[in-house]
Amino acid sequence: MKKLFPFFKGYRTESFLAPFFKLLEAIFELLVPLVVAAIIDVGLPSGDRGFVIRRVLLLAALGIIGFVSAVTAQYFSAKAATGFSAAVRKSVFSHTEALSFSSIDRLGIPTIINRMTADVEQLQTGVNLFLRLFMRSPFIVFGAMIMAFTLDAKAALIFLLVIVLLFIVVFAVMLISIPLYQKVQGRLDALLQRTRENLTGARVLRAFCKEADETAAFKTENQALTRMQTFVGRISALMNPLTLILVNLAVVLLIHTGAIKVDAGLMTQGTVVALYNYMAQILVELIKLANLIITLTRAVASARRVSQLLEIPSRITDGDDAATEKTEGDVITFANVSFTYDRAGEPTLSDISFSVKPGETIGVIGGTGSGKSTLMSLLARFYAVTSGEIRLNGVEITRYAEKELRRRIGFVLQKSVLFRGTLRENMQWEKADATDEEILEALSVAQGTDILNAKPEGLDMPVEEGGRNFSGGQRQRLSIARTLVKKPDILILDDSSSALDYVTEANLRRSLKNMSYRPTLFIVSQRASAVMHADRILLLEDGRLTAIGTHQELLQNSAAYREIYASQCREEAVADA
Amino acid sequence: MLNRKDTLKKVLSYVRPYTVSLILALFLALVSVISALGIPVLVGQAIDGIVAAGQVDFAIVSRSILWLLIFLATGAVSQWVMQVVYNHVTYSVVRRMRDDAFHKLHRLPLRFLDAHPAGEIVSRIITDAERLADGLLMGFSQLFTGVMTILGTIILMVYLNPIITLVVVLVTPLSLFVSKYIAVKTYHLFGRQAEVRGEATALIDEHIGNLKLMQAMGQEQRSQAQFEKINEELKGTSLKAIFFSSLTNPSTRFVNTLIYAAVGLIGAFTVIGGGLTVGGFAVLLSYANQYAKPFNEVSGVITELQNALACANRVFTLLEQEEQTPDGTALLPSSVKGAVSIENVSFSYHPDRPLIENFSLSVSPGQKIAIVGLTGCGKTTLINLLMRFYDVNSGCIRVDGADIRDIPRHQFRQQFGMVLQDTWLKTGTVRENIALGKPDATDEEIVDAAKRAFADGFIRQLPDGYDTVLYSNNEVLSQGQKQLLSIARILLREPSILILDEATSSIDTRTEIKVQQAFDRLMEGKTSFVVAHRLSTIREADVILVMKDGNIVESGSHTELLNKNGFYAELYHSQFAGTAL
């Protein structure tokens, strides 16, 4: 929670002035019954019309001042709340961008997004309401009681009693019904989940003739939801009648006490009316106060979640320096590298050692879960190695500034995503000042020219969110092009051509080979055909590097590689080898 | 889309069974309004009995208090019962509507489901129905009560003092006008806020949703700059929307204070003139304070009801959709041989874009048919037709001689086993998922199927083994593992005809070979249709259909097609002819 207070900086004045003006408004409002009492007690018996007019003008004046105070308060409060939440959102966004891959894995992206949107929104509402109402409502409730004390101490005891009882009733109803409403929401979510599932699985469900079963299950759940809703409804419907009864019983007591006191000359008729008016004000504000407390509880929960996110340390982005690079020899060296994911029992990679010369093409192959992607992620320093070291140009990669590392390494991820905007903007993501010429060249290498030519808009063609207006294969080719624009020294294709058919994939490989500049290239794939032409192939099995060599060497030396190759290619090819 | 009147009629038809309950509730509402309005009058009477020292009429005071207690008790009880009745009616109505909508879901043609995002349909059945419930509940409980309170207040005020009533009735619309004016003014501000917030959320979804990519590209700062721009904009529009909308309360309160002052002035003068008692004056003041409230409530309810009606419209539009054609009555023999014949079939998703035209194919029982082609060439279309997810436009498909449109869908689909590339798991345990097509399967059968699908190993490693609960948006299992589960499902079911649409695409090739052997055993003597992009898996097929741009361009056995040296030969060589590099 403490993490969030600094975001009020810059809005301190507003945060102070909003409740202050709200307080002023409340004070003016509380004076109204006193003025009316004066009219009844002084103006009416004496018949002094001038006195009445002056008091009524005072009422109007109180109204005007109250209005101005309220508007001022609303403005300051809205300003503080929106300013605060914008500052929080900005900070959460930048903090999130700086999280390490391990932290991202642990939190999960949907959680992060939820905190940034729903939780911050909740916070904004909470701050706004707090500034506006948290002073006003208690002030009116207790102010009315204090005013009652100034009018008549014994009558005021009735106020004290009724306020306590109202508090108990209002909170009891809320305390009982709110958890129940949460359960209702839970059931509603379950119903929603079932419906969504039935839609996404419509084909399978129909193929298995499960329509009737699913409908019956839905009905049962729907009925349970309705029962729950009706039950909660019954409880929360108690709130109005109960408060009505309490307040009016207090009124009865007031009248009773008033009658005796007035008869004895201890109180005036106007005072009775004023006390009656204060009673009415209490009820309205008390219910507002209860609602406010509920909203605030939610906001506090949101605040906790946002703080938690902000408390996660960001990744270390910069090493000390990398001035001592060697320009000759191996560009990349893995020395006894092992890696275990956070909270995983078994290491994903064990004792990996190999080195790569500049301009070499390295194929990485292995089954699902053999650690191929992890290997590449370590090279890009997305995760820190558990033991061993990785050197880039002879310098340990932890010593590079992150910016430097990203400039040198182009990483095309398995999941290819484009961003909303134009194709040109997308192609400029990794190199902001890329010219059309550079983009066209990259597109041509990545086999994306036909995508470009398919539409008349050319590079201005619109890209929808995530690139959903392109097919999976098109997105993959465009993602590769996007990275190629940057011309990185090291290019990693992490299974990023899996959605391409064999013809296109073969063409891509050919054009990568014939590029004018020669990056060190890593091709990760499950397909033997994608890696068999690499200068060397790394074969990973269960996180161990079990073979390394050319296609021919592996065919001769590695049974596992032979098996993979045979499963994908014709037997003759194996026989040829 | 239905028009508003039709929508209202439809809503009323759902409400009709509860007419008696509703009449009871309306009566109770009347009682509670009368008692709510009567209480201040009784308080006024009591105050009139308390004039000054020595001038208190205790008889009047006691009588008023007694009546007040009676009014209070009746009012409170009827208010509660009324609310309970409304709850019951509303929730029952919405429950029935939701049941109907869900039931409808499975009778809609897939053409409709494919054309509408799942989120949209879900929101009709769940969210829109819920909003309708909120609207109905609010409408029921506040509209009638509000209107009656207004009328009752006017009558009572006229009874107390017609002139003051006139002032109140004439000036009150000012407060309504002010709140309406603010609402209209802020409407577009809220719209703008929603728009900007939507943009901000979209950017967050895109950039934070692809956080790893953003970091891999090293473009966090650029992303941050884009976000800050929209964040600032959001701050500005939010401030405006929140501030202007928050003016409603102070403004109406201000107008009410003015009315209050006016009533105070006229009332006091009337009392001095002897035309009104002090108690009556107090009552008028409290009415003046409360009078505007039901107006605001009623106008709020009307907006809410319009909203609810719009939601109801979306639910009913779904309910009114045309359903798939009714089932036929022809019966398949108890043991299906698996002869499939496709006769002069034409099909297209859009009338102006022809796809499959005049296609015929005869498949003898036990044959293996493979469908190949580049990504996106329409291989899945053929499966849509075979499973009767879509009906052919012309021509017909026969199974064992019967037109599949004449066979009831369930009986027909019972014969098929289908594994799709996009695997789907339902929320439930692993066991339930495997037994999807055979709910009465024994544990031994389930484990046996899992073993044959090579899924037993990883299932046992899951936290609760076969009882591990999976969710449809599950991230615990890899795509390959999900495929193995889907395969286990089919192995358990032992269908007569098998359809595999890239069923093993995410499984590593060594496991794939073993799974393939399981399939082969299952399919011995049975007809199968296989879509694959790994050509090695389909060379033994009896007939290979080669598709391009939605059309079947070649068909024949592997050797025939290679000899033809056409498109298939090109595909085949490209897959293995990496050696050409």
Image (spheres, rainbow, N blue to C red):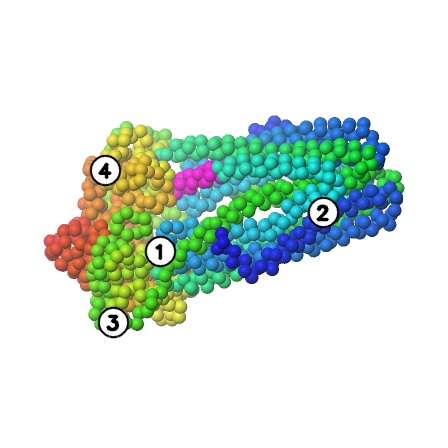
Q: Amino acid at mark 1?
A: Phe
Q: Assess disc 1: are there few (<14), some (14-19) or many (≥20) residues with their C-alpha within 10 Å of its C-alpha.
A: some
Residue ID at (31%, 40%): B463
Q: Assess disc 3: are there few (<14), some (14-19) or many (≥20) residues with their C-alpha within 10 Å of its C-alpha.
A: few
The boundaries of the magenta stretch are: A184-208
Residue ID at (28%, 50%): B547
Say which quarter of the image contains residue B431: top left
Query: Label 1: chain?
Result: A
Residue ID at (53%, 38%): A178
Mark 1: secondary structure:
helix
Mark 4: secondary structure:
helix
Q: Amino acid at mark 2?
A: Leu
Q: Position of residue B328 (x, y in %)?
A: 37, 32
Q: Position of residue B34 (x, y in %)?
A: 71, 32
Horizontal arrangement in the rendering, residue B327 relative to residue B421 (left or right): right
Residue at which label 1 appears = A101
Horizontal arrangement in the rendering, residue A488 relative to residue B277 (left or right): left
Mark 3 or mark 4, whichever is nearer to me: 3
Say the numbered circle drawn on residue A30. Answer: 2
Q: Position of residue B60 (x, y in %)?
A: 80, 29
Q: CA distance from mark 4 to mark 1?
A: 35 Å
Say which quarter of the image contains residue A486: bottom left
Say which quarter of the image contains residue B393: top left
* Pointers 4 and 1 within a single chain: no
Of labels 1 and 2, earlier in sequence is 2
Horizontal arrangement in the rendering, residue B524 relative to residue B55 (left or right): left
* Pointers 4 and 2 within a single chain: no
Mark 2 or mark 3, whichever is nearer to me: 2
